[in-house]
Image: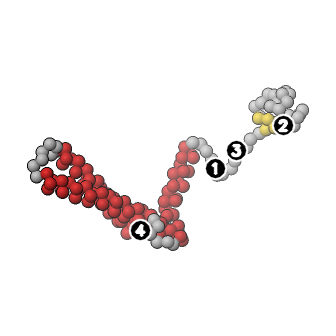
Amino acid sequence: MPRHISDERKTAYYVGMGLQILGALLFASTFVTFLIHFGDFTDFEARARSDGFRAFGGMSLLIIGSIVRGIGARGLAGSGVLLDPEKARDELEPYSRMAGGMAKDALEEANINLGGEPTKVIMVKCRSCGRLNQESAKFCQECGAKL
């Protein structure tokens, strides 16, 4: 299984991110020009056409950029463009490893040990009823007899 992402996928990821940034800037520019020209109705039709084109173009670039970025991040099979489960597994392996590493870090931070040797728990058996009690218990949790 490959542990690295190909240069083509990295390039597609960053091109998609660039398209998203450009689309966001184009879309946001329509609001800026609206605020600048608020109340000014000279040449309104031309500005409305320009603003509409930038808004539509910006949204289109945002959508196209997110698709290209997703394909770059997960690969063609991993993103569902190609229906090949084996190839998808190979393409998604670095991200699965990363997610597992993040989960492992979170468990370690919370002092939760899922692997390795289990901690030994010592229990004390009651002589009266036979119930297992915590080692620190002074009386049986079942019958109340002194341990």
Q: N-terminal of the two: label 3 or label 4?
A: 4
Residue at x 40%, y 64% (from the top left corner): 72
Other residues around mark 1 within 10 Å, as few (<14) / some (14–19) / many (≥20): few
- Choose mark 2 or mark 3, whichever is in front: 2
Q: From where the camera sits, is residue 14 visible?
A: no
Residue on which the image places disc 2: 131
Q: Are marks 4 and 1 in contact (CB under 8 Å)?
A: no
Residue on which the image places disc 4: 6
For residue 1, side relative to residue 49 (left or right): right
Q: Name which residue type carries label 1.
A: Leu
Q: Name which residue type carries label 4.
A: Ser
Residue 124 locus on image (x, y percent): 81, 36
Q: Are marks 3 and 4 in contact (CB under 8 Å)?
A: no
The answer to whether 71 is drawn above or below residue 25 in the figure is below
Residue on which the image places disc 3: 119
Residue 127: numbered disc: none
Residue on which the image places disc 1: 114
The answer to whether 67 is drawn above or below residue 32 in the figure is below
- Choose mark 2 or mark 4, whichever is in front: 2
Residue at x 84%, y 37% (from the top left corner): 131
Q: N-terminal of the two: label 3 or label 1?
A: 1
Using the image as rendered, state which of residue 29 and residue 75 is in the foreground.
29
Q: N-terminal of the two: label 2 or label 1?
A: 1
- Choose mark 3 or mark 1, whichever is in front: 1
Residue 133 locus on image (x, y percent): 79, 35
The answer to whether 74 is drawn above or below residue 117 in the figure is below
- Quarter containing the C terminus: top right
